[in-house]
Amino acid sequence: MGGKAGVWIDHRHAVIVALSDNGEHTTRIASNVDKHLERGGDRPLEGRAEPLSVPADDSRQRALTGELNVYYDAVIAALRNYDRLLIFGPGEAKGELHKRLEKAKQRTRIDAVQSEDKMTDPQIAAKVRAHFGVSAPRVQQRD
């Protein structure tokens, strides 16, 4: 295990910036989760919706939760090799990831969980470098 990483995360994607002796490495993980599930109702052009043709809210929530679990597991797998971690992002995903990391009993030390609005990849990398006191990258790689 070695190195430091920062992850900006929301329910749509995560951007992981890893800092090591070899330089800086950026990885993007997409969730493929449709967060805004809409329950269909009356459709004026097509007539009324049949109650049995619309999935129940609880089954849709279970499906969303299952998709998010797969996403968080992929992010956790990408973070396994780091000693220290900064988690930040705009919504609930950062707290959900933090809880899952604690539950997984990772040996990674979580330095901070911070609220941060939408950011570009270079802004994310700059924040991670600033948090860990690292100057400009020597080598930058992207996935």
Image (cartoon, rainbow, N blue to C red):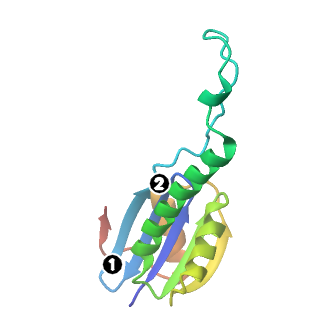
**Residue that appears at 44% across and 76% down:** 79
Identity of the residue drawn at 54% across and 44% down? 34
Which residue is labeled 2 in the image? 31
| Amino acid, disc 2 | Ser
Instruction: Determine whether 38 is above or below 115 in the image.
Output: above
Q: Secondary structure at mark 1?
A: strand
Residue 38 appears in which quarter of the rendering? Answer: top right
Mark 1 to mark 2 CA distance (whole Å): 26 Å
Occupied quadrant, residue 111: bottom right
From the top left corner, tell me how far across and down residue 103 is, in percent: 59, 81
Dot 2, how many residues are within 10 Å of its Cα: few (below 14), some (14-19), or many (20+)?
many
In-front residue for pair 59/129: 59
Query: Observer-nearest residue: 51 or 12?
Result: 51
Q: Mark 1 is on which residue type?
A: Gly
Q: Residues within 10 Å of mark 1 (few under 14, many from 20)?
A: some
Mark sitting earlier along the chain (1/2): 1
Whole-percent x, y for residue 78 in the image: 40, 72
Does the CB distance between marks 1 and 2 fall below 8 Å? no
Q: Is residue 136 visible?
A: no
User: Which label number is shown at residue 104?
Assistant: none
- Where's the N terminus, which quadrant? bottom left
Identify the residue shown where x is 47% and y is 54%: 31
Per the image, the residue denoted by label 1 is 23
Residue at the image position 58 percent from the left and 57 percent from the top: 65
